[in-house]
Structures are given as structure tokens and as C-alpha cells.
Amino acid sequence: MLRLALLVVFLPMVGSEFFGRVLRELNSLVRAAAGAGQDRDLRRLQGKSSPTYVGGITVIPGEYIVTLTSKVPDGFSARGVVGILNDFGVTPMTVFTSVNGFHAKLDDAQVTRLMADPEVEVVEPNYVEYVTGVSQQDPVWGLDRIDDPSAGDDDWYNTPYDGAGVHVYVLDTGVDYLHPEFEGRTGSGYDSSGDYSGDYDDDCHGHGTHCAGTVAGKLYGVAKKATIHSVKVLTCSGSGSSAGVVAGMDWVSNNAEKPAVVSMSLGGGKSTAKRIAIENLVAKGIPVVAAAGNDGQDANNYSPGGEPAAISVAAMTDANSRIYWSNWGSEVDIFAPGVGIKSAGHDSQRGQQGKTKTMSGTSMACPHVAGGAALVLGENPNYTADQVRQALYDASVKGVVADPKGSANRLLNVKSFPGGGGGGGGGGSTTPTPTTTTTTTTAPPVCTDFPNYLDFYGDPCSWYQTPQHCGWGGDRPNSDGMAPIQACCMCGGGNIATTTTTTTTTTTTTVCRDTPGFADEYGDDCSWYATQPTKFCDAAPSWANAQGVSAADACCVCSGGGGGAPPAPTTTPAPPTCSDIGGFADKYGDGCSWYEKGPVLCGSYAQEFTNTDTGISAATACCTCGGGVQS
């Protein structure tokens, strides 16, 4: 719930320059009051006196909107406005620039004096406004538990979300569309059960209607404004076939209105077709929520509750313990209430309106989470299925379920989703921003011997793999005029393959960090802007501090801030370069280029064939033989 503060509205008076002076003066008063423990805009309003009710409308006691007339004299200055307020002992709490006004706390005497002033148009109460959300007294225990599990049950279901605009496809025994729980929030559907006992908008068993009621019923539902679509895949007996289930998913894949969620409170054996159908839905951005199963076994042995692409839900009791018959294991993603769950009953089409039924099972836990997914998508309609899953993970309460037996110990929490409308935020950092870097590497050339080559003596290139052989006959051509130093890689010849280039793309992340120590001209830091970024960040540039820095520059939530401390630069020393000793020739007159023809030449002759005048060998003079001059 959110209370919106009162406004004091000035009707049009003189020019915009005058209003600028007036509002600047009033803003200074507002900020001074905030420093004394009063409130700028919405910040500590909840801590003030409790609301009362006037004619069925909630008002905040002692707070009023004052509207001035349009008859204020042209000479009325900003200081004159301040003077009139001071005369009445009034200090404005909030000044809005979108309207000409402010709101203030007033006692009865001040209200009377202001109403009698000819320059005051009207004085009216400050009404309480509510964001679109859900508040329900004495809810069923499952709803009470998931609206803030860490705080305990309080006999209320409170969440700032309602799932409006989201379409939930319930694959089950059908849904009783006429049940008053759904308020007409039903849409197109499909029947692949092969039952022929009633279309998708009827339910001859009751299981599907109960689950749909937990997803989106007005009393028993998690997402109370979501639209239900029935996909009937099970018969009146509560059973069906894998083919019927896959056909139902196929219809959803081709016909779903988005944003959409699939809820599957059913199970059977492992099936490749079911797995692929679920993966295809997820790839299209539709999260699939599935019951883990009621066999007290590893959920990995069942489908859809054991499919990695599905969000698998296990059941817990009101004592926050896994119920003994709930499946468990590494494929279970989250726990939700599943024992003694009251929801909608069926048979409205047979004259029994508004029935209820109490049931237990992971089938009852599943629609709690499907409703939670609908709440996430209602606030973030462009989320992928994986982002919905992550939002549920992030919001969940960890480590509170007893005996999870290898399952992820997460309890559904719909009070606040990260990035959604129900959360407040602090400063520090925001979601890392991906940065893509492309690196190109070139592989060294590859040498292959000339195929079928034979030397002067009829020996192939393989003979020259033996050390010293290239030196013995490597430069002697065969009858075709080709010597081993041309044909064989070991002797420095052969075919050199085309150089290959490989491009590798890597993604790194940069974390945004608020500017340390930032505060605006009124002393508010980035955490204050994070409480209502859409509203406060728009006005941030006008609240710059003395250094001219505003939240738009300093705070990540307002698209400012900067990266974290840059990593220390790494320096890779350049490899040394080698130069042959100029003019070197061995005792046979061969220079370093001869030794480059094959590695065995260095091993065989570099030390032996020294220059007769200088005594220097290739081992000393030539880089290829380990000599040369390093630089």
C-alpha cells in the first residue's frame, strides 16, 4: 500500500519567473522542515498518524491541501508567500512543480484562518491513495505465508502486484469459467483431453478449477487480476495421456497471448516429447511452472516436474516443512504451500455457484508459484522465462524449509521482486552491464611433405626424419630436379598450409557503482533516489549539490555512477628479438640461411663447421641454431 501526500495547489497567478521565485522559496522551507524530521515527498509519511475514514474515503489526519485563488496581486512576492505562511504558523511539507502547490500539517485553528483568507481558494483533506495491488484480510494460510514469509503470518495478504495483463494457461481437467472467483477474467482455451464430456471452459473433475483459483481467484488467488486460460488435457477421471499434454502445450506455443505463464499441476513418466515441448515454450519467453509430484521420490524421475526447463515446485506444510509425500531432489526449484489449500470448487455450470474445496498436493503448491510468475510479468512484461525464474529465486526466502532433502531451499515470496514495483533500493551497484570483446588469433602455418616424393636414392621424406640425413643429401635433386630441402619439411621444404585465423568472442560485465559520498543539495544520497527512481530521477538535475553534481551524474539508479575500481593493468613483456651475426659463413661458405632449411642441420653441423678464420660456428652466429644477438 502506498499513501500519496497532500498537495497545496496554487492557481495561475502571474508569470513563470514569479512562480520560480515562489517555488524556490517554498522548496527551501520544505528542505529545512525535512532536516527537522519532516518529510520531502513520500519519505516517512507512513510513520505519521494513522488514517481515518470520512464518507468511506481514507484521509490522513492533520494534513491538508491548500489552493490559492487566482486573485493574488501582481506584486505578491515570494517572500510575501513565505510571510503569509509564517503568519499562520504553517511550514509546507512538500512542494510540487508539476502543479502550483504544496501540502502541510495544520491544526484546526490554522484551517479556520486559512479558509477565511480571501486569497485561499480551498482547504481540503489529504486523502490516502493506493497503488494497484492486493490487500486481503483473513486469507487462506497459503496466501498469508507467501506475502512475506520472513515476517510470519499476520492474517493479511499484502502484495503491491496483481498480475493484470498477464495470461496464465492452466493445463489440467478444465476450468469452471462461470465460477465467481474468476470475475470473467477468462480467455480462449483448448481441449486435447479426448474426454468429450465438456469443453475447456467446464470442469467435470474439480482439480483444474481449484488450481486456477489459486493462481488468479479474487479471494483465493495469488495474481488476482491475471487472466485464466483453460487448456484441458486431463479427463473427468483426473487422468490423461502424454500425447494430450503435449498437444495442449503445442496449442499454447502457437496461440498464447503474452506475457504468459503455463501452470502444470500434473505428472507422469519421463517423456522426450514433453521435455522438448517445455523447452520450446521457455524459448518463446513463456515460463512453465510444474508440480514436483506426490510420490515421495526424486522428482528427476518424473515429468514435467523433473524437467530442467520447468520451474519445479515442491509442497510444504504450514509448519514450513516439506510434506513427506512431496517429491524432492536437485530438479526442485522452490517450495510453496501445498497442504490443506482452500480454493474454488467446480460445477457452476450445473447450478452450484461459488463452491469451494480444500485439497492437498504439489498440484496445490504449483499454482502459488505460477501466480507468483504472473506477478513478476505484470511488472516486467518483457522478461524472458529465465528472468522470471531468477526473479522468483531472488525474492524467495532461503533456508527456512525443514527437510528439503536435496531440493533448493527456497520459499516463495511475492512481497517484493527485485527490479519490480514493490521493492525499494539502496545504493551501491546495479545489474552488471555486459561488454563483448572479440579476440582474433592466428594459428601458425602447417607444413606437409610433398606426397610420394623420392630422393636421388629412392628414399622418401620419412628417411630424412633421422638427424643428419638432410645434411648428407638434402641438397641433391632427384631425376625431377627436386631436392629434399624443397620437398621435405624436416629439411626446410614441403608444402606450407594456408594460415588459419580464429575469432573468439567473450563477454565480461561492468558493475555500476554509485559515486562515494554523494549527496544532493538537500543531503539525500543515492539510496533515497532508489526508493522511487521513476519519479525522483526525472527531477534529479534540479537538485544538484554545490559542486553541480546531481543524482543523474552520481547514482546508478538514475543512469549515473560509474564502474568499479578498474583492474590493475597487466603488462606482458615483448618477446626478445634475435639477429644473426652479419657476414657469418661456416667453413663451407654456408651462411645462417642454409641452417634455416631444417632443424637437424643445427644439431648435426652447427658446432662442427666453424669458420676457419674466426672460429665462430652457426651455434654462435645463427638465431635458428640458438645463437645470434638478442635484443
Image (cartoon, grey):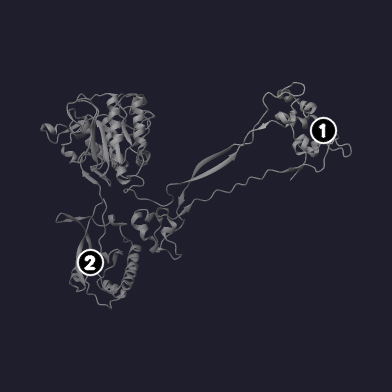
Quadrant in which residue 57 is drawn? bottom left
Closest to the observer, 31 or 449: 449
Looking at the rendered structure, the kind of residue marked 1 is Gln
Query: In the rendered image of this protein, does residue 45 appear above or below residue 359?
Result: below
Closest to the observer, 218 or 398: 218
- Mark identifier at residue 570: none
Residue 403 visible, this orientation: no
- Mark identifier at residue 66: 2
Looking at the rendered structure, the kind of residue marked 2 is Val
Question: Where does label 1 land, which residue?
Answer: 607
Quadrant in which residue 334 is drawn? top left
Helix, strand or loop at label 1? It is loop
Residue at screen point 79% across, 26% down: 473
Quadrant in which residue 377 is drawn? top left
Query: In the rendered image of this protein, does residue 26 appear above or below residue 506?
Result: below
Q: CA distance from mark 2 to mark 1?
A: 104 Å
Of pointers 2 and 1, the one earlier in the residue sequence = 2
Helix, strand or loop at label 2? It is strand
Task: Report x, y in % for residue 434.
Answer: 46, 45
